[in-house]
Amino acid sequence: MLRRFTSLVIQNRGIKQQVDIKWVRPDYVPAYKPERSGDLEGLPKDTVKFTALDFSLSDEIKDAPEAVKKIFSVAHLGRKEYRTLVQKDLIDRVRRHKYDENTSETRIARITGHIRCLQETMELHPKNVNTKKLVQELIDRRKKLLKFLRQYDYKKFEWLLEKLNIEYKGHPETYHKLTRKESLRKLTEMHCDDIRNKKLSDYRNLLESQQGPFLQEKLNTLKFIRSEQIELQLPITVNEQDIAKVEQQLQEWKLRDKQKQQAKQKKKNILLD
Amino acid sequence: MAHKMKDVAKKFLLLGQCVPTVKQNATKIRVKRLELDENLLMYFNKDEFYYCHDPNKMCKTGDIVLIKMLPHKLTKLITHEVQEVVYPFGDVTDPVTGKKVAKARYREDIDREAELYGKLQSAFDYDKAPARGWQEGKKDFTAKPTYTGFHVFDEKDPYAI
């Protein structure tokens, strides 16, 4: 009986929480997905429209009937033709000259086209391990090329990101598996920061609200002292400038207070709506 | 040894590289030093990090900068200030000729090559290119450190991986 009771206590100790925080574990997203690889743009959808690259140069295809065009379209000829077309489209966006095939921007564009095609394949066949491996390798290689480009030519790097619609994120300090403990620690830290900041801002508001009455009192007192000194013909210690300064401070405070009240009212109205 | 180093650091300028940080009113500078391992009698790299005061936002991530110790600490964290940017990141100038360089070649040579082959409209133009930073926070997420995403927040942070 006692043993069972103690074991219960020990089991509960692990789940005990001081702060009421609800942790939601982020869903697993495979690395080949566009949101992980940083591709903001998909592939052109209507594949029947595009004639394969080799046939598009011929004159006969231009005034051929629809059925013939369909046969020579990318949709009919297969994925490989489609991929060359996609890659050519991306390379044409950044090409320096007609024969430019192996500069950093064209290489990145070619890899990007390949990645986007393979991402679609992965959507259709998620268990295709060879493709999965290939996409991962290509994504890593592209990231490496982008990293080098960033190091030696930052302007071109930014231009390329814009042209090809890619996101670039730096490497984190460590790649590690997410743990519950780490997440809870970070969330608790954020919670504590929130509490601290709230207390500090509350205290600041309190002090600032006391500033106005104090300045008013100071102004009155200074004026009184000056008038008394003039009346009694004593050496004057409070000059006009001091009084003007305090008056200006008071005006500024009133302005700030008005703005604050307005913001508060706005917040209230939004909450009521 | 370490004590001496600290004295030296107070007097002289330090050369370091700006690294990404979450702090908004300070820049984080990494200074690389060599440290002697007395058992192996070999020098090893040792990084030291300084948080620097930079009100004008002179330096961006990756820049090589000169920093100097402040006469008194600004906050508990900020001890130095950025004096000048020596080498902006990814915008190298050849010190001998004063020309701009990309990797191992002059930029004008690269342009010349493209012109000889017949430069296309799609080619990158250095003269028209805007200054660095126009993609920051849009497609280029390198200003702050990235981290492993640990919670599902209402607002998604692009720096979480």
Image (cartoon, rainbow, N blue to C red):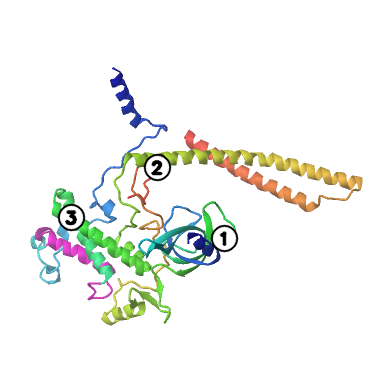
User: From where the camera sits, is residue B68 visible?
Assistant: no
User: From where the camera sits, is residue A197 visible?
Assistant: yes
Chain to which mark 1 belongs: B
Residue A133: mark:
3
Please state if A225 lies on the left or on the right of A71 as rendered. right
Alpha-carbon distance for marks 3 and 1? 52 Å
Furthest residue in direction top, as rendered: A1
**Disc 3 secondary structure class:** helix
Mark 3 touches mark 1? (CB < 8 Å): no
Which residue is disc 2 drawn over? A186
Q: Earlier in the sequence, mark 3 or mark 2?
A: 3
Amino acid type indicated by mark 1:
Leu
Alpha-carbon distance for marks 2 and 1? 32 Å
Q: Are marks 2 and 1 on the same chain?
A: no
Question: For the point 48% across and 60% down, which residue is it?
Answer: B2
Badge 3 crowding class, 10 Å Cα cut-off, few under 14, some 14 to 19, many 20 or more, is few
Give the magenta-colored segment's residue range.
A73-102
Which residue is disc 1 drawn over? B70
Residue B43 sits above or below residue A119 on the image: below
The count of marks equals 3
Amino acid type indicated by mark 2:
Lys
Q: Nearer the viewer, mark 3 or mark 1?
A: 1
